[in-house]
Amino acid sequence: MTAARVRLGDLSVGFVHSLSAALRKQGIDAVPLLESYGLDAARLADPRAQLSIPRYMRLGHAAMQLADDPALGLEMGRLRKASHMGLAGVTAAQAPTVREAARALTRFEPLYASNYRGHSRFEEDARGAWLRFYSISPYNAYNRFVVDTVLASWITQLGAVAGHALTPVAVHIEFPAPSYAPRYEPLFGPTVTFGAADNALRLDQPVLALRNPEHCPGTWRHLLELCEAELEQRTRTRSLRERITQILGPLLKGQEPDLQQIAQRLQTPTWTLRRKLAEEGTSYRTILNDTRRDLAMAYIRDTEAAFGEIAWLLGFASAEAFQRAFKRWSGQTPGEFRRAQRQAG
């Protein structure tokens, strides 16, 4: 059986609604742009419809150009509503506290978005908590707005739960300060650090404890049950190969992860993992090579990333090693493959 092609990620088409709202606020009709990306009213009304992350990035970049506003992502995040994130968003909006809302947004993220690069996390300690969004470096005009939108939507949606605007203790953003850096302060206050080690919001314990005036215990419990059931269903239908492929993405950057690292993530002894893979008729080396091949093709086809950047993202020792491997996989150099894909598209 042929394995499904690895994708860089997908998200709910609900994310498009805040993009439309941000354009409307500037007096721009978003409909022609959305329809040029196949996002007509019927598709936007489909609760299961997904948009690939590379396509979302191209759509966002096109919207920023249309509005002549590189900070459009911040406005998209500010205008994002809980309902745009489907069941998970509505569940978070019914949480009893800001803390539980933040947990719901990160725990149930797979219900509205999946990215091969990683997943969001909620990490609490005695003084507060970090909401962390994974790295999507290397950064460029196509993807900075994604970080802007996520962090802005988090602080906006958690403020909606509290019933008033929130000011984080700190905001970390991985890329260097952009030309529109002053636009962050109205949303986050004077707490933003650019060129940080990660993308994250820091909230203190008093903010986390703020109660939701709209909370209904029975509704919250019911929504949680629905989210947990859907999350379990999605997890149960994935094969061991698919689970390993999902784990590999964040680990590949700058290194070639070994079987022991994967076994630790799966909380399975290495020998057991090797045996189970053999029972499925495959091996870790086969999955690693197939994943690198599929991701290489996706990066070249769907992004503007330089080949040296792709080599690092896939854990190759050098750009030359990546070029040789890609020629083995496809019979073409990365440059030839990209040109052929652009001509075919």
Image (tube, rainbow, N blue to C red):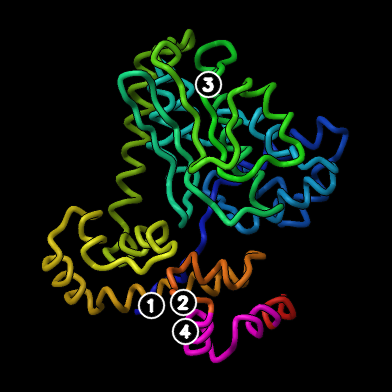
Tell me which secondary structure the magenta stretch mostly adopts: helix
**Image quadrant where residue 106 sits:** top left
Q: Which residue is labeled 4 in the image?
A: 325
Between the C-alphas of marks 3 and 4, the distance is 45 Å
Q: Which residue is labeled 1 in the image?
A: 289
1 and 2 marks in contact (CB < 8 Å)? yes
| x and y, in percent, of residue 200 in the image | 49, 35
Between the C-alphas of marks 2 and 3, the distance is 41 Å
Question: Most extreme residue toward the right, as rendered?
Answer: 27
Q: Check disc 1 and give the amino acid type.
A: Asn
Q: Nearer the viewer, residue 42 or 182?
A: 182
Question: Which residues, given as a range, are shown in magenta?
Answer: 320-339
Residue at 63%, 20% in the rendered image = 189
Q: Check disc 4 and give the amino acid type.
A: Ala
Q: Name the secondary structure under disc 4.
A: helix
Q: Check disc 3 and give the amino acid type.
A: Pro
Which numbered disc, 1 or 3, marks the residue that appears first in the sequence? 3
Q: Which residue is labeled 2 in the image?
A: 293
Count neighbours of disc 3 (C-alpha within 10 A) and say few if under 14, some if 14 to 19, many if 20 or more. Answer: some
Q: Which residue is labeled 3 in the image?
A: 168
| x and y, in percent, of residue 80 in the image | 63, 31
Between the C-alphas of marks 1 and 3, the distance is 42 Å
2 and 4 marks in contact (CB < 8 Å)? yes
Residue at 39%, 25% in the rendered image = 129
| x and y, in percent, of residue 303 in the image | 63, 64
For marks 1 and 4, give the one nearer the viewer: 4
Which numbered disc, 2 or 4, marks the residue that appears first in the sequence? 2
Which numbered disc, 3 or 4, marks the residue that appears first in the sequence? 3
Q: Is residue 123 magenta?
A: no
